[in-house]
Image (cartoon, coloured by chain):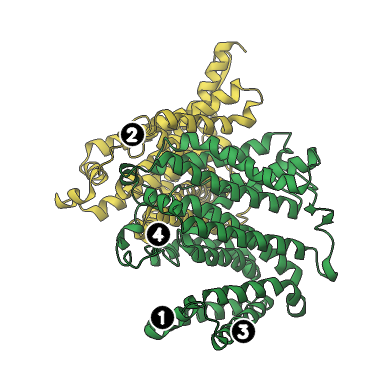
Amino acid sequence: MKSRFNLLHFSAIAILEIVIFFLVMIFLNIESVWTLIFLLLAVVGVVIFAKIYRPQFESMTRFFSDNRPTVLGILIVLLFLFPLISPLMIRQNTYWLLVLVQAGIYIILALGLNIQLGSTGLLNLAVAAFYGIGGYTAGLLSLRLGAPSIITLPLAGIGAALFGMLLYVPLYKTKGHYMALVTLAFGYMVVLALDNTEFTGGPQGLMAIPELKFFGYSFLTKPGGLHFYTNYYYFVLVFVLLAIVISYCFYNSWVGLTLATIRDDEIAAKCCGVNSHVWKGISFVTGNVMIGFAGAIYAHMIGFISPPNFHFGESLLIVAMVLLGGLDNILGIIIGTLILSILPEKMRVITEYRILIYGILLIVIPMFRPGGLLPFKPRLYHSSVAEGEGKGRRNSDATQ
Amino acid sequence: MGTEAVIIQILLNGFMLGVQYALIAVGFTLFFGVLDIINFSHGDVFMLGAFVGLTLINLFTKLGWMGGGIYPLTLFMIFFFCMLITGFLGILFERFAVKPVSESPPLMSLLATLGLAIAIREAVRLFYPMGSESKRFPELLAPIFAGTSKAFEIKGVLLRYDTLLIFGIGVAVIIVVSLYINKTMIGLGIRAVAQDSEAAMMMGVNRDMVVDVTFFIGSALAGLTGILNGLFYNTVIFDMGAMAAVIGFSAAVIGGLGNIYGAIIGGFVFALTQAFSAAFIPRGSEYMDVVAFGVLIIFLVFKPSGILGEKMHERV
């Protein structure tokens, strides 16, 4: 089980992952509704199969979790190879590259929100507002002051953090639905203010935001004849990995444990000497830094941002990603984000109806899986004692 | 205009909007009472009300009932059938979408009602003829005052009779509903379920029936508000429900969730804040919503459970 290198395991995992990788490529390439339907049926089939042959399935997943470094290593290598292979296989490869970059930005956003919502139980319905604050900070700094990217990106995170601290003052006074309302109102406030202020470009927004540029390397150059999105792909991929590592460290440390006690029972946490106000603030601000940073990447990449980009619907989408994946479950959130950001692009075939279907999915999923697609398990904190305990509690009352 | 005239104008605008916000907020607070759920699709039921009203008007115009001596009856029928239809649609949504998720964690139920809101909105956009464009809503009330003068004046402010009638209808309905909830057996049932649904069921209250009735009342009110809003602005569009939901929810929270009088007060407070900030802040008409939401946040800092909300006690 431990890190003894096993060639057989390694090659088995490698072959499996490469097959899945190419299947995903083919899936991205085919543009008919039937692929979607087929994929849906395949997923249902796998789920039923897993239910019937549970022991075998569990031994298979255990095989993967035992060899986690290998699995992740090969996956990361494949992800890094994607821009090189995709032009050979996918017709609209630049478009799909862009979609994947946006999916990566959404993963950063969702992981940022997860620190607030999943780990601490702070429902932030103003995610899109902080996303926008990050984007506008970066855009304004580079347009009005000509600041280089190496300054705008961190300052975007800091800007979002400052607004987060400002909003935290009313936030720590309120609870539950009232807290949700405060963030909701803040989200509307930010968008309306951006819409009406001339300094931020009003309803037209900011146009022609310069691209990212580090040490003289402009992100508009085409590396080896590939599209310039490849630069952004690698950039975002690195930061997604960083965000995952940060989230994992957060989750797997005493900080994450402290936040979990606040989420599960704030009064009990206070009784045990946890300074809940301070910790909630830290979690809220940390999440906002990640969200604001993602906003800056988006602004630099697209080059054009306007208030409708950061409307409440966008917040909703990100909250849906986290809830769909499962609160405080990093792998689940990544899967949920990928589903919600790539599936709508595939559904462009049925463009007219895709928002309707999205709405119906949002109704149906909570009915059948109230804890999200991958509901979180009691954490194993360096021991196997926690298994089975507190299982019923975790899913209940995240906002109360 | 003198200062008095300005104040009267502001108050008038505030009350006109306030009565609409109050009607929507009552729905939010009622649903929260019986099911412990924030039903975000309520704003889109309000939008549906406007579209049902529009459809009825078109239907009656085709039948040729929109004129002559029969006109007041037609008008009544429009309001009545609109409330009936949206009420039953409300029960339908409750049965198929809202109640099944009301037992799941609050976040999930919130998500589901938001999904329902999106579904309703998109259904109207896709399936209503020319649904994605904003539509003109006819001035229904103006013909009533065709013979007489259309307006009167107080201190230089022109008050139109038909806007006053909109206000009157709203206030009358609010009074009827609060009487219904406070004086009838079913109203008692609603209040009982809101207080403690298990205890109410043990005392013989039919919870399912009470929930249905509550959703009927709330949705019918939203439908009526849809028509009133259409009459007030003379235009309706498929996405007008989103903002209505946010404002209605805000009003319900300002008043204190679960309290009907609170919701009514909250609606007027929110509308008056909007109206005053539109008038007294430089470039106020653009920033009025920003100010209103800002006031809301500051208000919640000092009164975290709303004006008439119960004090939150935490038990260990």
Which residue in the rendered view is the most extreme toward the bottom? A8
Query: What is the letter of the yellow chain?
Result: B
Residue A19: mark: 3
Residue A353: mark: none
Chain letter of mark 3 equals: A
Left or right of residue A291: residue B120: left
Residue mark closest to the camera, 4 vs 3: 3
Residue mark closest to the camera, 2 vs 3: 3
Residue B269, located in which quarter of the rendered image? top left
Q: Position of residue A167 (x, y in %)?
A: 52, 37
- Closest to the observer: A370 or A284? A284
- Mark 2 sits on what residue? B309
Measured Cα–Cα span from mark 1 to mark 2: 50 Å
Query: What is the letter of the green chain?
Result: A
Q: Dot 2 surroundings within 10 Å: few (below 14), some, or many (20 or more)? A: some
Asked if disc 3 and disc 1 are in contact, CB closer than 8 Å, the reply is: no
